[in-house]
Image (cartoon, helix red, strand yellow):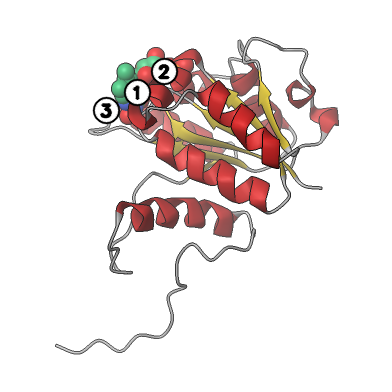
Amino acid sequence: MKKIVVGITGASGSIYAKRMIEVLVEQGILVHVIATDTGKKVFNYELSLNLEDWITEMQQQYSNLKLEDNNNLFAGVASGSYGFDAVIILPCSMGTMAEISHGLSSNLLCRAADVALKESRPLIIVPRETPLNTIHLENMCRLSKVGATIIPAMPGFYHHPQTMDDLINFVVGKILSYLKIKHELFKKWEDTKYED
Ligand SMILES: Cc1cc2nc3c(=O)[nH]c(=O)nc-3n(C[C@H](O)[C@H](O)[C@H](O)COP(=O)(O)O)c2cc1C
């Protein structure tokens, strides 16, 4: 069974994390969710949903979903030997990105990201901030240089989205495609004839 860590921080865009978790558990992937304190608050604020309650509800249907304690550095995902396949942090705040880019592992989420980098496993950072200052840009650059993949929460419009769901699915689908996980969240771009 594949094991994926999904990190949720206090950046805007909790809906992306919710959709990602739904899609991964449906595929039978073991999902370890780690939320920061602000991540839980923003999730609640943006989705009018308590993260713990929602996970408990999801667990009625899916046994392959686990909510980790961000303060528990004794968790399996804190170690390289646990052997998770990837870490996806979405949405990723500039604060968490700064911590990871400087090698700080003071909570479970940053530790799992650090483990992914040291073990050369995919670390996908989905930053959400605008405008970006030079510190943000430099931190993205630092992470990219050490092997992380930056997939900004930046939906495209060439697939003619009709709903907010289409926009969310586009970003989530891009991450899944990168990890070579099959999905039908958006139609693949094919040879297209453009006419004026
Ligand atoms: C409603 C709300 C939206 C926020 N949106 C963003 C955002 O899009 N990007 C960001 O970097 N920080 C955002 N923040 C600020 C972060 O939550 C804050 O920097 C926090 O300390 C991040 O901590 P964490 O990385 O431990 O979750 C937002 C805060 C709130 C309350």
Q: Is residue 116 above or below residue 1?
A: above
- How dense is the environment of label 2, judged by Cα within 10 Å: few (below 14), some, or many (20 and up)? some
Q: Secondary structure at mark 2?
A: helix
Residue found at x 47% / y 73%: 188
- How dense is the environment of label 1, judged by Cα within 10 Å: few (below 14), some, or many (20 and up)? few
List x then y, in percent, for residue 110.
59, 21
List x then y, in percent, for residue 54.
54, 30
> Which mark's residue is nearer the viewer, 2 or 3?
2
Question: Does the Cβ of the disc 2 residue fall within 8 Å of ligand 1?
Answer: yes
CB of mark 2 within 8 Å of CB of mark 3? no
List x then y, in percent, for residue 86.
67, 41
The answer to which quarter of the image holds residue 77 is top right
Residue found at x 35% / y 23%: 45
Task: Answer whether residue 133 is visible to the viewer in this image.
Answer: yes
Say what amino acid the circle numbered 2 marks. Lys
Residue tagged 3: 133
> Which mark's residue is nearer the viewer, 1 or 3?
1
Q: Measure the C-alpha gap from mark 1 to mark 2.
A: 6 Å
**Image mark for residue 14:** none
Ligand 1 is found in the corner quadrant, namely top left
Q: Measure the C-alpha gap from mark 2 to mark 3.
A: 25 Å
Question: Does the Cβ of the disc 1 residue fall within 8 Å of ligand 1?
Answer: yes
| Mark 1 vs 3, N-terminal side | 1
Instruction: Compare residues 196 and 121 and report the one nearer the observer.
Output: 196
For this orientation, the residue located farthest to the right is 81
Say what amino acid the circle numbered 3 marks. Asn
The answer to which quarter of the image holds residue 52 is top right
Q: Measure the C-alpha gap from mark 1 to mark 3.
A: 26 Å
Residue tagged 1: 45
- Residue 172 is left or right of residue 193, and the answer is right
The quarter of the picture where the C terminus appears is bottom left
List x then y, in percent, for residue 189.
42, 75
